[in-house]
Image: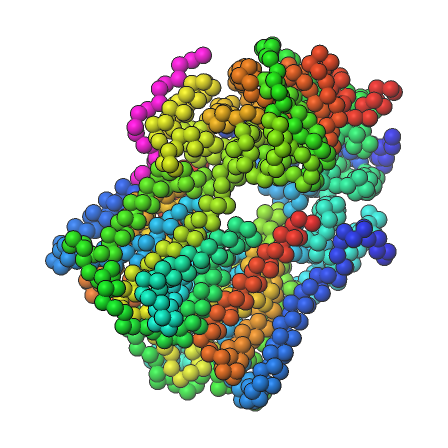
Amino acid sequence: MTAVTLAGAEADPRRRLRALASQEALLAIAVIGLAIAVGLYNPRFLAARNLSDVLLGNAYIAVAAVGMSMVIVSGNIDISVGALIGVLATISGTLAVNGAPIVVAWLAALVAGVLVMALQGVIIAYLRIPAIVVTLGMLSILKGGLISVTGGKWITDLPDSFHLADIEIFGALPFPVFLMILVTILAALWMRYTASGRAIYAVGGNAEAARLCGISQPRTVVMVFALHGLFAGAAALLYATQLRVIQSTVPPNLELTIITASVVGGVSILGGVGTVVGSTLAAVLIAEIASALVFTDVSPYWIRAVQGVLILATVIADILRRRRMAGA
Amino acid sequence: MSEIPLPQAAKRVVPWWLLRHETMLAAILLVALIGLGGLNSRFLTLDNLLNQGRLTTEVGLIALPMTFIIVTGGIDLSVGSIVGLCAILLGYSWKIFGFPLPLAIGFSLLVGAAAGFLNGIVITKVKVPPLIMTIATLALYRGLAEGISQARSVRGYPEWFYFIGQENLFGVPAQLWLLLIAIVVSAIVLDRTTFGRTLYAIGNNETAARFSGLPVDRVKLIIYTLSGLMAGLSACVLVSRVTTTRSDMGIGYELDVIAAVVLGGTSIFGGVGTIWGTVVGLAMIQLLKNGLALTGVKGDATIIVIGAVLILSTLVASSLQRKREGI
Amino acid sequence: MMTDTQTEVPSAPLLSVHAIEKSFPGVRALSGVSFEAARGEVHALLGENGAGKSTLIKIISGVFPPDRGEVLVDGRQVDLARPDDARRAGIATIYQELLLFPELTVAENIFMGHAPRAGLGRIDWRAMREKTNALLASLEIHDLQAERVVGSLIVGNRQRVEILRALSQDARILIMDEPTAALTEYDVTRLFDIVRKLKARGVAVIYISHRLDEIFAIADRVTVLRDGAHVATKRVADTDAAELVQLMVGRRIESLFPKITVPIGKPVLEVKDLERRPLTKSASLSVRAGEIVGLAGLVGSGRSELAQTIFGVTPAEDGEIRIAGRQVDIRSPAQARSLGVAYVPEDRGTQGLVRPMTVRENFSLAALGKVAFGGFIDRGAERKLAGDGVKRFAVKTSSLEQIAGKLSGGNQQKIVLGKWLANGPKLLILDEPTRGIDVGAKAEIHRLMGELAAQGLAILMISSELPEVLGMSDRVLVMREGRIVAEFSREDATQESVGAAMMGSHAKAEKAA
């Protein structure tokens, strides 16, 4: 196939693959590079114990970010996921403490997650209320609901079998890390190889064109939110089973961290592009940065600011890139 | 040529549904006031009502520029974080940098305005959508607040500083005067000035507004800067009222503010809305909180109701608007 | 000219559109339009903006149904309630705003919604790539790869992706809406190659364009629409450009345009070698006080773009503008306004009027400074301004507080005009001032224009209605491909001379034949 290129008008053929790979490759390089840099400054950072703690403690963010990435790719946003995770953890823990079979306690979190998110999806897609309003409202309902129901009490006497984090797959891989990898791979495969997975990209990229291709935007959005709820449920379980207690408040700023992971992972906030592999790598990177702050004697209170700068820079770069492309 | 009827005198005709919305809301407010007053004798006392006014100020000051912003079809989610940032910088510039307190107050206001200005500049020049920009700055400004303060708080402000937050002026809480003045000024600006008219034009048809020679970008820049400035003012009032500065101040303000504005009849899609509506919305929400508290519901739980109110009022407003446009 | 290569004589035309009527609130878009296209025919659809072409196309594409009339494919009536129905009937449409997914690849864009599957129902990316390559080869496209991201493609290639998408769905009827609007000459040639290949396969191509030279190059027959009605269908070989222009724009001159002789003053606007990509190449013109200069040209010649550059919406990249003799650099409409320039845009609804706002508010929108003191709007002054405007322009409205969007087209246009005049401008640029307006309102606007000129305003009138241009103008300028190519005095301007200049050399060649 002869490649007759018009005078410099078009970019290199493999640009897409290269571009995509570069975002994820960049992240992978950043993860490794940061580890080396901090390790040089403070070798204790590279101790196996620390690295596994970092991964273990933050795997749930990556799992939630998989769902969030799907939502953002479809052209929407969700800021209620942090509150939902708190609520789901409490539901699950309460059931466990009150003698329900552990499996039921786990499933309850997943089912409740799907239902709540699917409800939001329906309001957004069929009632046409902007996602920001719906998820902002739901965030408050969940947050307030949690406080009222728990009355401030923490759940402390969880049965041992509840703790997913203790399970080790193949005797070596902690369950949370295993789940993170599994979910990422499954979601990535689904988004690449199924029609409904591709429909998310279509709806997020050009909803009108998608409609003319026979893709129903409302149905796709509800499906995406339902899946997001499933992953939020899984994340809630991991979150709940890390510590021995479940707090009565929603984890602060969790949704921001999750959104940052998605956006920095290459998911464009305008929709239509991005992968879950990227968001998982970004989640790992963010967790790594948080830990690095501790080991380099920088106050950990700066982590939010770092996230803020990352997300702002990524968003501006993305908008500028799109404007350049549109002008071409 | 056929006769044209003379223009009708004086009657300010407003889109029918909005008129209905505001009066409906005011009617509900009145009913609720009476109802709650009947249920609980402590409610309708002047003391209580004035105190509620005092508590509304911090959210209310921010709800005014937010009304401007939502009327243009934009949104600002970073206001809560700006409050936190300004509160922190108020404390720090005074305690750590050694500014005299009045200067520290001025500095804090300046930071708020700068934070809003950054939002505005990126929104108008880089053309990042307001929703996305202000989610990013919501993270950034909160992060700066946390980083600068290292989660330490500041206390021990001089007595005179607590006047605005805690004392009365002519029998009315001092900060409430501030809010009232701000309400009157905002209402006049939105309703009677060319600036206000420009806001409505942008919200209804930004392209036609530009084609008519209106300074769209400049106006947008001003309202986002104003939003930041008012968040800073709100922070000062808040610190004055609770006597300490903490980095978690202002968390969740955006919910109360946006809920009040939307409840008051401002359409989330832009082009429609009034300051009076926002005031009624603020009153309703404060009333809800107070009412719930008086019947024993804990403070935190009231946000459930606020969240539900936000979604429901948007639903109602949007279906009414669709019906109106379908005519 | 290629003869049709049909492998069989069809018993019925492939596409037949019969007595289509369609109205929207306040406007009759199509009144009894019929035409047909045969297998392997390229049938051009010609008409000015507002003639009804895009409404007709949307009906055939299933975007909305007609009020009356039928569409038949292969002699059988098809019910086109949704775009999907059209697709299934073998009808594919390529719109001007290309409906593509910029972040996805060429292959995926082509096969979105009907991707080839492998085992377990998973998407077979390899088969997709291979099928895309096959499609590319079948049209002999060699500079496009299946894995390219569509967003990185130039317009010509993006359009090709859309064509391939239509082919991947076995479209037998392909509708192309202004396909060459944004293409280079080279791309246009390649497009024609593809169209010819499609013809050879028996695909009927409905080709909408203003560019007469293209129609003569590629089409077999042409149907002319005007004001929502079918004017004529001709074989391209049997007609010429001049006749087509006459059919497109020629109208009975229904009323004598009242042309008052007005003393012409000094130049208010002087434009020299103005340039703004992509459409304004190097335009020069001048308009003097009291003068009405008509700017004629085929749609796509760049007239509105020139106006918007002068008005500051899309500031000039090169060249010079002088207002009242002084050189200015106009960077925004606000600036233009302050210099005394007013622009009544072509697109009333999006650019001219804020439809949800009231008549009063629209009237004052460009002249807020005049009814405001220290920033405060004086309601009384505003009502007076609007009231005066309503009287002066005879705007039929129940009150000043009526929502502007509910008024008729003519009244809306009067408001847009009125709002600018409230400002007391020196230069008034009118872009298609009487399009989509009933006869009575048209006459009123023309009368107004005459009065304004008598008051010393300089008026630049862009219009596609030749009688209007000829009747109203003191001088007629013709724009073609981003340049002013001809100027006629009032005496020398005729439909033939202006029409010829609008079309350029092709018309001359046609006339010579």
Q: Nearer the viewer, residue A34 or A177?
A: A34
- Residue range in magenta is B1-21
Reply above or below: B245 against C311: below
Asked if one can make out residue A122 in the rendered structure from this viewpoint, the answer is no
Q: Can residue B72 be seen in this view?
A: yes
Q: In which quarter of the image is the N terminus of chain B?
A: top left
The image quadrant of residue C224 is: top right
As displayed, is residue B236 above or below residue C223? below
| Closer to the camera in the image, B186 or C111 | B186
Q: Which residue lies furthest to the left in this view?
A: B41
Looking at the image, residue A312 lies above or below residue B32: below
Relative to A322, say whether A43 is above or below: below
The quarter of the picture where residue C344 lies is: top right
Q: Which residue is drawn at 52% across and 66% down?
A: A309
Residue C207 lies left or right of residue C347; in this view the side is right
Closer to the camera in the image, B208 or C379: C379
- Residue at 63% of width from left, 33% of height from top? C327
Query: Measuring 40% from the left and 84% from the top, which residue is drawn there?
Result: A244
The quadrant of the picture occupied by the C terminus of chain B is top left
